Amino acid sequence: MGEKSMAKATIRDVAQQAGVSQSTVSRVLNKTGYVSDETRMRVQRAVELLDYSPSAIAVGLSKSRSRIIGVIVPQIFASFFSELFYIADRIAEQYDYRLLLCNSDANAERERRLIDDLLSYQIAALFITPVDGRDGNNAEYLNSIRRSGTPVVCVDRELPGIQCDGVYIDNFGACYEATREVLAHGWRNIAYMADPPVYAPGRQRLRAFEAACREFGVVVPEENRMLVPIEAWEKRESFLREIVSRKNPPKAIINFSKGWDASMMRIIASAGLRVPEDIFLTGLDDDGALQAYGYYVNYTPGTLVIATSAANLLMERTLCEGKLPEPTRETIETHLHSVLRSGIELPPPDVSPAP
Amino acid sequence: MGEKSMAKATIRDVAQQAGVSQSTVSRVLNKTGYVSDETRMRVQRAVELLDYSPSAIAVGLSKSRSRIIGVIVPQIFASFFSELFYIADRIAEQYDYRLLLCNSDANAERERRLIDDLLSYQIAALFITPVDGRDGNNAEYLNSIRRSGTPVVCVDRELPGIQCDGVYIDNFGACYEATREVLAHGWRNIAYMADPPVYAPGRQRLRAFEAACREFGVVVPEENRMLVPIEAWEKRESFLREIVSRKNPPKAIINFSKGWDASMMRIIASAGLRVPEDIFLTGLDDDGALQAYGYYVNYTPGTLVIATSAANLLMERTLCEGKLPEPTRETIETHLHSVLRSGIELPPPDVSPAP
DNA sequence: CTGTTAGCGCGTTCAT
DNA sequence: ATGAACGCGCTAACAG
């Protein structure tokens, strides 16, 4: 390509080169309005000659809408979110949209600032796994954004009072099934780890856990429970260290704190215990490496399904051009997905001390 | 806040509200030029009253530079890249920059398109783990971008002929040390998996592997080697399935294909073999879950170090305002980092069949 | 079918 | 110290 070290060509240069007006160039580029075949040719040749490509930022300003979709997740390095992002990117790309990614660090106030910032980019839509912590949430703010015409699609975490499109998983079903599985095997000396029941997901999970326990007539004592939010990893760690160092450690751990399984494995291993021979684990994470070790996963059908569903909804709304339909709410079914290393033997049932 | 459902306030609204001109408002907002204390106050109050925040996109157009940094990685879901991104984001954020993330899928042509697209956003800088595959690379293009004034910082993969800032790891050192570790233990029936030696990293790794082998007088036969690029996961899988199903499978696998370890674990496990009791693994990945299973890692000091270093360099260049210094090249030292599950016994040495 | 004109929201001279 | 005017690059409404 005969590129000189000149500055980037603008639409004006193209117009000049082709001997037409800017609007004509704009017309052929955007395929809007009628243009004679001959002029079209001339313009196209000028475009190639000058290696012209429009300034996304100028287009954005002019149309008061960019082709950027804002994405906010708690932390991108959690595998669920990075996979979610990847899939969303692949889909958005087909429509020529780009994703501007931010980490909220599970902090509502921070999230709020990020939203504001994204808005200043005239984003075409907002794709978010909203924070719902002790410092509140931005449900109302998100609602107002949607009302003002910017599509908002929530994933994985349903805020109370939210009135935006959303794709969620069946927390109750997943946790209920997982707990039953453990109890049905006969284990009684078990531990439970999860988010606190102050917000929707934690509440649903705890309800599910207790429902299953009740069904089996089992009571898990306080010292075998740890209900802390995601951020409190230190508490989780020390709790886990404590229980695995007991003379009679739990035979099974039910863990509904997402993104924490890998660390658990490490801690358990460093205590000289094996999974699942010494301690059986069950949870919501969907990690390939964990699966290799007889780990029960019931987040199936997994990230791919929820991500695809959410991303498609996102694009649907993004392409809506103003008239947003009523908010949709989809819940992805979950199914117990057990993976067991072949040849491994599950530890025998036990009897828990009466509470 | 007394928000009405009015459209977003512009700088003009603020000016009107404060009874001054737009330029004055601009001055107080950007702290540029003199403004009397009194006018400043009035403007600030108007800003708060109207809940004004500048349009990032308009600022970008007007200054011909946005506060967006383009980021291109092969695939964000590989843990190395998602951690890298997270850290870069945390640092960039301190300077009020946002990251626009793209996945190149290890495809050079695709990467080229992504670069073009990012450029159309007038990005302040480009942060990239460039592709270097059989379909070529964009070294020259990246160089030209840097020359034209946009900072380019490469991470983890050094392109031949690249003349941009870069932060890389010591591939030779890491692989040499890992191979020696295995051979020193006495294993001889071993397998080797890595990228093909057609590009720099693959070449360095193979050289390191062979240097160590030579040192121990060991020759690894063809049927125990699989040198294919990252994308060729099918070949890798079938190769692995084949070797683990042999009557006499390798005692150790040296794997220098990044991001593939977790899958390996799964395949090996599904063949009824255990790690490391039956097969010992060593590689470059830094995965917490893997570490729990007696897995040797020598990518230490790990993602955090390389990411921090790279991100700081990135911001330094981003804030350069035009005059870019000569390209810098930094290589992060690597150290063998072995993690072994306590109480586990390594498989005994063996003697490989003479080639 | 095509050119002219007027913004989009803001930074930046250049006067005053 | 402040305002008027122009331009960033492009789209859209209005004429012809």
Image (cartoon, coloured by chain):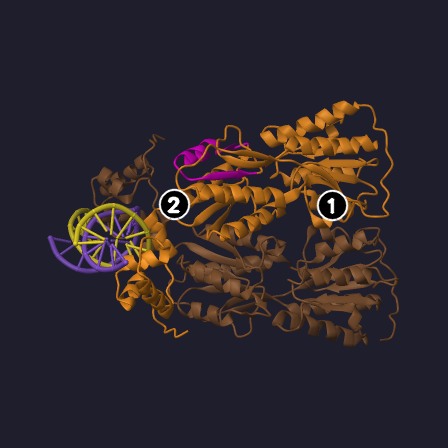
Chain colours: A orange, B brown, C purple, D yellow
Image spot of residue A169 (x, y percent): 62, 36
**Callout 1 secondary element:** helix
**Callout 2 secondary element:** loop
Indicate left or right for B139 with A283 as reference.
left
Would you say the residues marked 1 and 2 are in contact, meaning their CB atoms lie under 8 Å apart? no
The tag earlier along the polypeptide, 1 or 2, is 2
Q: Quadrant of residue B171?
A: bottom right
Camera-near label (1 vs 2) is: 2
Image spot of residue C6 (x, y percent): 21, 48
- Name the chain under label 2: A
Q: Is A141 a magenta residue?
A: yes
Say which residue appears at 40% left-offset and 49% top-offset: A66
Choose between A319 and B101: the one closer to the eye: A319
Quadrant of the image containing the N terminus of chain A: bottom left
Which circle marks residue A265 in the picture?
1
Choose between B338 and B4: the one closer to the eye: B4
Q: Is B233 a magenta residue?
A: no
Image spot of residue B70 (x, y percent): 47, 57
For disc 2, the marked residue is: A120
Q: Amino acid under label 1? A: Met
Check disc 2: other Cα within 10 Å, few if <14, some if 14-19, many if 20+.
some
- Residue A245: in sight, yes or no? yes
Indicate left or right for A38 with A103 as reference.
left
Say which residue appears at 28% left-offset and 48% top-offset: B26
Q: Amino acid under label 2? A: Ser
Check disc 1: other Cα within 10 Å, few if <14, some if 14-19, many if 20+.
many
The boundaries of the magenta stretch are: A134-155
Q: Distance between the residues labelled 1 and 2?
A: 43 Å
The answer to whether A313 is drawn above or below residue B262 in the figure is above
Say which residue appears at 80% left-offset and 62% top-offset: B242
